[in-house]
Image: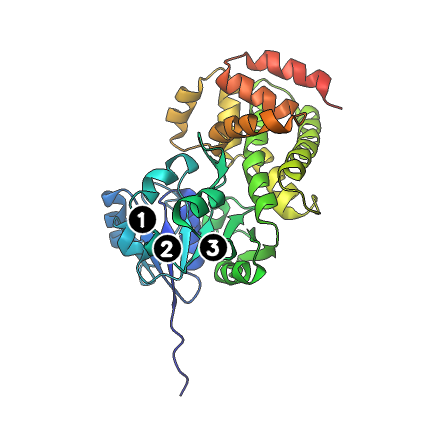
Amino acid sequence: MHKKVEATKIAVIGGGSWATALVKILSEKNVRVNWWLRNKQDVEYIEAHGKNRSYLINATINTDKVKPTTDVVKALKGASVVIFVVPAAFIGDVLLNISEADLKDKIIVSAIKGMIPQENLLVTDYLQKTHNIKPDNVCIISGPCHAEEVALEKRSYLSIAGENSKTAAVVADLLECSFVKATVVEDLYGVEYCAVMKNIIAIACGIARGLNYGDNFQAVLVSNAMLEIEMFVDAIAPKERNWIASAYLGDLLVTCYSPYSRNRTLGNMVGRGYSFKAAQVEMNMIAEGYYAVKCVHELNKKLLIPMPITKAVYNILYEKISPSVELRILEDSMC
C-alpha cells in the first residue's frame, strides 16, 4: 500500500490578477494553498463560486485545494512557502501585520515586479531588511508570462530566480504544470532589476503608441532599452549574464508588445493625454512602472548611467513635461 504524500502548504499573499493566476497554477499540483485577500466579499465569492469576482473571472479556482481568507497570519500558519503578490507600494502595509516569527524558516518568494517607493529597494531586499529573511531562502517569480494567458491555460513560461538554486528549484517544481514551464535562473538581482526596468520601458512604448508612433520606432526603442537595462543592472549588480535569455529579453518583449501589459496600457493613455491619476482610475490596476521609474531615477543619481528612455518616462510622469516633447528628444538620442 502506497503512503499518501502530504500536500505542500503554500501561502499566497495578494488578491489581484497575478495572484489569481499563480493560485490557478499551484492548484494543478499536490498542494494546499492558503490564499490571503484583502476583500471579504472576494473571499466569500471564491468560496461559493470558485472564481475571483474582481480579477480573471474566467479562471477556475479549485476550492478543494485553495482556502481563501482575510486573516494574513492564518494564511501563513503551517506554510513552507510564502508567495507575496501585492503591489510594491503596499507591501509595507501588509508586512505590518506579519511578525519575523511568522516567516521564520520559510521559503519567501516575491512575485512583485516593482520597487519600494521612498526606500528605493527591491522587494527581496526590503523583506530581508524588515523580517531578517535569510538570502538562501529568497527567490522571485518573473516572466515572460501574462496572468490573462495563464487563465486561458495558454502555454506560458516562468523564470524562478534566486541565489540558492535548490530553493529556486523547489519553487519551480511547484509552478510547473501542463501549461506552464518554470526555469531556474541563478541571478536574483539581475532578473529582479530587469523585471522592474521592463515596466518602465513598457510605459515608454505605450506613450509612443498613444502618440501614433509606429512599429519601426518601437523596435528601435526596445532595442535601445535592452542596452539601457544592461548598463544599469551591470553597474548595480555586476555578473556575467546572457541578456537574450527569456528571463531578461523575453520578459521585456512581452511587456512592451502585449495588449495585456498594464504598464503599456498606462503609457498609451498618458500618450493620448490622460493624467496618471485619471489613467489609474480607469484601469483599476496598479502599474508598477510608475513607482519604479522614480526609484531607478534616484538610484541613477549615484551611478550616472546614460538612461534616456528612463529619463523621458520620469520627466513625463513626475516633471509633467509634454510626452511629445520628450519623445522628440528620444528620436535624436536613439540609433
Q: What residue do we see at 41% from left, 43% from top?
A: 17
At mark 2, the secondary structure is helix
Q: Are marks 1 and 2 in contact (CB under 8 Å)?
A: yes
Q: What residue do we see at 32% from left, 63% from top?
A: 78
Quadrant the C terminus occupies: top right
Q: Can you say whether 98 is above or below 88 in the image?
A: below
**Residue marked by disc 2:** 103
Numbered label attached to residue 98: 1
Relative image position of residue 289 (x, y in whole percent): 51, 31
Q: Left or right: where does residue 282 sit relative to residue 325?
A: left
Nearest to viewer (mark 2 / mark 3): 3
Tell me, yes or no, if residue 254 can be seen here. Answer: no
At mark 3, the secondary structure is loop
At mark 1, the secondary structure is loop
Numbered label attached to residue 134: 3
Alpha carbon of mark 3 to alpha carbon of mark 1: how far? Answer: 16 Å
Relative image position of residue 37 (x, y in whole percent): 31, 46
Residue lying farthest to the bottom in this orientation: 1
Q: Left or right: where does residue 184 sit relative to residue 117?
A: right
Tell me, yes or no, if residue 196 can be seen here. Answer: yes
Q: Can you say whether 254 is above or below 224 in the image?
A: below
Amino acid type, residue under disc 2 in the picture: Leu
